[in-house]
Amino acid sequence: MKNNKTANLLKTTVLLSLMLLQAAYAAEPSLVFACPLKPDPPPVIDGDIREWERLPAFEVEEKNVTWGKANWEGEEDLSGSFKVCYDSNYFYLLAEVVDEKITIAGGKGMFRCDHVEMTFVPRYEENAKGPIESDWRIIAFSPGTQQPTGDIFSDLSAEAYFAAPSETDSSSVDVASMPREDGYLIEARIPWKLLGVTKRPEIGDVFGFDLHLSDSDSGLDQETLTSLNPTKWRGRQKENILKLVLTGTDGIIK
């Protein structure tokens, strides 16, 4: 009898362990994303996104609100999608943002207003932990003035700003933005060199990255943050970085 009880207890323990393991795997977000090669012609950075139509999108919704969830008022308040691609000279980014109230600022000030943000890691480390490294790129993109007045002192153009490395000149980053009924879109082209990639990119190359949408209805401070990695935001850490794999035009990771 005692042996039967011990065996049943062991079976129950094993079953519970398997159930917990399955639940953990089910909750684990996909941490690997494909960046397809964009054949000629590459996207023209002009706010016309028809060249992007066949590329896969990374959706950002409620589960991706990683900071300021109490301030989030629904998908019309902040949500959207991203697309990425590349060629031998540039990394391309498209962000389609749903935001019912848009606030803007230029330069460093855009971090207290609405913006799109990208973290890029030129040297990806599998299962790495700890704080960020000095070669990480943190880039913010502002949509600029959505309804220009013609006043050169008040209208702001769409722009990119490097928060890290802080001395980076972003003038070679091309950025375009277009207003939409429910928000805005941002299209950007970034030279690989500015991302810390010094050799010609090839299929199979691996980098670290994450993409964020930031919302501030007041324009005074960041109120809500969404991230492609839905893990709760605890600052930039190596363990929260996603893996980005360069693929062929089919977008299939091999």
Image (cartoon, helix red, strand yellow):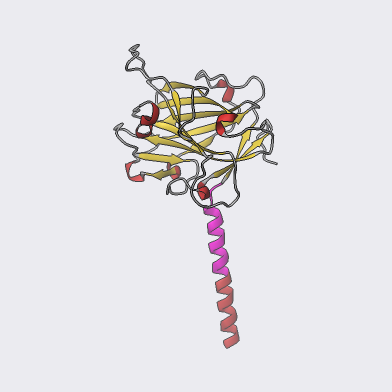
Task: From the top left corner, tell me how far across and down residue 236 is, in percent.
Answer: 46, 45
Q: Is residue 217 left or right of residue 193?
A: left
Q: Is residue 151 above or below residue 219?
A: above
Q: Is residue 138 left or right of residue 220?
A: right
- In the foreground, 247 or 182: 247
Quadrant housing the C terminus = top right
Q: Which residues are magenta?
A: 15-30
Residue furthest out toward the front: 167
Task: From the top left corner, tell me how far across and down residue 209 is, in percent.
Answer: 54, 40
Task: From the top left corner, tell me how far across and down residue 7 is, in percent.
Answer: 60, 80
Residue furthest out toward the bottom: 1
The structure residue drawn at horizontal position 60% and vertical position 49%, both measured from the top left corner, is 126
Q: Is residue 232 above or below residue 8?
A: above
Q: Quadrant of residue 105?
A: top left
Instruction: Name the dominant secondary structure of the magenta segment.
Output: helix
The structure residue drawn at horizontal position 52% and vertical position 48%, both measured from the top left corner, is 238
